[in-house]
Amino acid sequence: MSNGQREITLRFLAEPADVNFGGKVHGGAVMKWIDLAAYANAAAWSGKYCITAYAGGIRFVAPIHVGNLVEVSAKVIYTGRTSMHIAIDVQASDPKVLENRLTTHCIVIMVAVDEEGKPSSVPEWVPETEDDIQLRDSAIRLMNMRTQIGEEMEAHVKYLK
């Protein structure tokens, strides 16, 4: 059963195992954290097991350093019948100073599934504030753009066969 929690934030320290060859946190580690936060948020909203259907628009804005306090915030910004669009912001700071700076942001679409792995309905999210309405409208515009991009990609796939 859903507890209707719309937002969740994961907090932890970036570890030496997360570092890339350039000495900063590896983008793959950040993407893993994004997926974890999206799952936790989608499961809390829907009360169901959820799978990742899409992660896109990932922007790596600033590096994360080993030892930084990392916050991965996830928020439901649109719901379909079985899907949830989750906005993700990753921020980091030196734990001695705690001045967060945006490092990464993206959109993740999660789908709730039943015990057989089939899509399962989710509670509707209805925006109440002007900011929430803008977030929902943005999610809808992005969904329409992804449809157009998908159609363009199909043309490329035909020529690769």
Image (cartoon, helix red, strand yellow):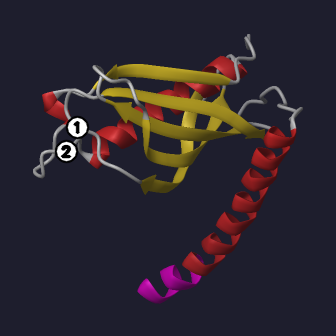
Residue found at x 62% / y 73%: 149
Q: Of the residues shown, which amino acid type is indicated by label 1?
A: His
Vertical placement of 38 versus 143: above or below? above
Q: Secondary structure at mark 2?
A: loop
- Residue placed most toward the observer, 31 or 64: 64
* Pointer 2 with pointer 1, Cβ within 8 A: yes
Image quarter hosting the N terminus: top right
Location of residue 150 (image quadrant): bottom right
Residue at figure coordinates x 55%, y 77% from the top left: 153
Give the labeled residue for mark 2. Answer: 24
Asked if the stretch drawn in magenta spans residue 33, the answer is no
Pointer 2 local density, CA inside 10 Å: few below 14, some 14–19, many at least 20: some
Name the residue tied to disc 1. Answer: 65
Please tell me whether residue 16 is drawn above or below residue 79 in the rendered image: above
Percent position of residue 129, x then y = 87, 35
Where residue 40 sits: x, y (%)? 54, 22
Q: Residue furthest bottom?
A: 159
Predominant SS of the magenta segment: helix
Amino acid residing under circle 2: Lys
Q: Nearer the viewer, residue 154 or 115?
A: 154
Range covered by the magenta-colored residues: 154-161
